[in-house]
Image (spheres, rainbow, N blue to C red):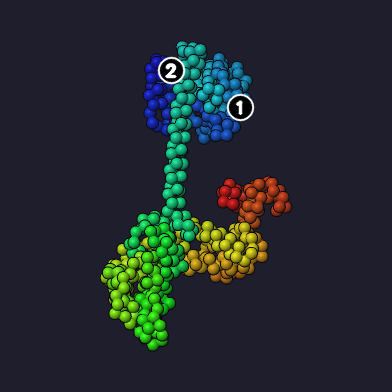
Amino acid sequence: MELEALHAISRLLSATSMQRESLREILKVLDERLHLKRGTVTLLTMDDAELVVEAVGEVEVTPEQMAATYREGEGILGHVLATGRAEVVPVVSREPRFQNRIHKRGPGKGEFSFICVPISLGSEVLGTLSCDLMHSVQFGLDNAERFLGIVASMIAGDMQNRRVLRLQREALESENRRLKDALICDYHPENIIGNAREMRQVYRKIKQVASSDTTVLIRGESGTGKELVASALHYSGSRADGPLVKVNCAALSENLLESELFGHEKGAFTGAYQSRKGRIEEAEGGTLFLDEIGEFSPLTQVKLLRVIQEREYESVGSNRTKRANVRIIAATHRDLEAAVADGSFRQDFYYRINVFPILLPSLRARKSDILLLANHFAEKCGKTLGKPIHRISTSAINMLLSYHWPGNVRELENCMEHAALVCGGEVIQGQDLPPTLQMPGIEEQATDSSNLKQRVAMLEREIIIDALKRCNGRVVEVAGELGITDRMVRYKLKNLGIDVKAITRQH
């Protein structure tokens, strides 16, 4: 019977099931095959402070009983934990240390013995295995103790294997994260800030196309940083040593834009008192960035199409053909597909510039980057103004995250410049932000008693969070700073849902 039970237990431990399920099945085997009743496995908590119930056999146990714990030296289980040696209680009813916390053994069910053995790895006690043995069962206490010791060793070996596998898995996951982070850093252009998933896709696209001469179309709302992406493409590619020439097509009329791009000869038009190089020629050997290309007239589109396809063009007022050795990067915030549909944008030109599109997300689509960008701009503006700005307050952060940012990153930079200019200390407060970010309807909200309570709680939360940041999460110091007891601080932390660890990690 014992050999059969050991064989069944070894098969259970070799299976890939969860640890708790395996332990329950082992205790079931002990019950059914050897009549070792009320089997229980307790394991040490992560901080080694106490034993908690991990698994029980085929008996009814209430949630309160499952929540039972034993500290070192407390009861039979606590004594086994402290000494690392097995304990055998021949008659439970005569043992004063027996505390009956996990199983409620009622009277009138006959006398029984209790056996508890340590689950150990070397000198390290991981937990306990215990069972009841009825006096009517002819198994013997010595045999039962020895057998449970063998089973406990098998459980300890299984726990060690699981621990090794877990550490290996964690090491692989850590290495995987490290490689991903290294890959992101490799893709991450130095001039662009942002770790959001949408931005990582942009970095990958920049990496894919930077080394080629492929025409790139950067799309996105105004203020999303299209010019920064153009710079990253240029300085990451083979033309980095050449010039990067930028033209804002929306700022020039059709005639001026043509002259700006292609240059003109002396006398080509009224006011052309001397010849002038165009931007295409200035960008020779480098990159020409055409911002807001959606503003081109159909005639200019035709001429630029020739530059892209044939690499040829003529200056205004000249019949001499020039060669263009430039890479073209275009950008627009317009819906070019709609412009093609209504005839304001040539379809052939659209297909020629849309070879490799890069879509920049709006700031509201990557809210996780708002605080990162805000801190960067605050520090940058602080240095420019000669102000050491060290932090953005919780109230200001909430306002930044609540705003919809129609002007995107450019608007955020302007807001932080305004805040850095008006702030009176080293911390940017909510009132330092521009009026467009201020919360509306405060006076109306204050007239409602429930809203007033919410606003008081919000203010309390911000004050406590700011104090936690200054005191690096030390509750006693926070209490001293705020003039209340540390017990009151802990009460506030619980009621207001403040995670001290999360705050100290971010700070």
Please name whichever residue, 112 or 457, is drawn nearer the observer in this view of the structure.
457
Sooner in the amino-acid sequence: mark 1 or mark 2: 2
Residue 23 appears in the rendering:
no
Quadrant showing the N terminus: top left
Give the number of the disc on residue 157. none
Residue 175 horizontal/vertical position (percent):
45, 41
Question: Please, is residue 368 above or below residue 71 in the view?
Answer: below
Give the number of the disc on residue 34. 2
Residue 420 horizontal/vertical position (percent):
61, 65
Residue 434 relative to residue 259: left or right = right
The residue sitting at 29% across, 75% down in the picture is 321
Amino acid marked by disc 2: Leu
Which residue matches tag 1?
72
Question: Please, is residue 282 above or below residue 37 in the view?
Answer: below
Classify residue 8 by image quadrant.
top left
- Residues marked 1 and 2 touching at CB (< 8 Å): no
Disc 2 is placed on an element classified as: helix
The residue sitting at 71% across, 52% down in the picture is 481
Classify residue 273 by image quadrant.
bottom left
Residue 392 appears in the rendering:
yes
Please name whichever residue, 357 or 280, is drawn nearer the observer in this view of the structure.
280
The residue sitting at 41% across, 15% down in the picture is 2
Q: As drawn, which residue projects farthest toward the bottom?
A: 270
Residue 349 horizontal/vertical position (percent):
29, 71
Please name whichever residue, 327 or 87, is drawn nearer the observer in this view of the structure.
327
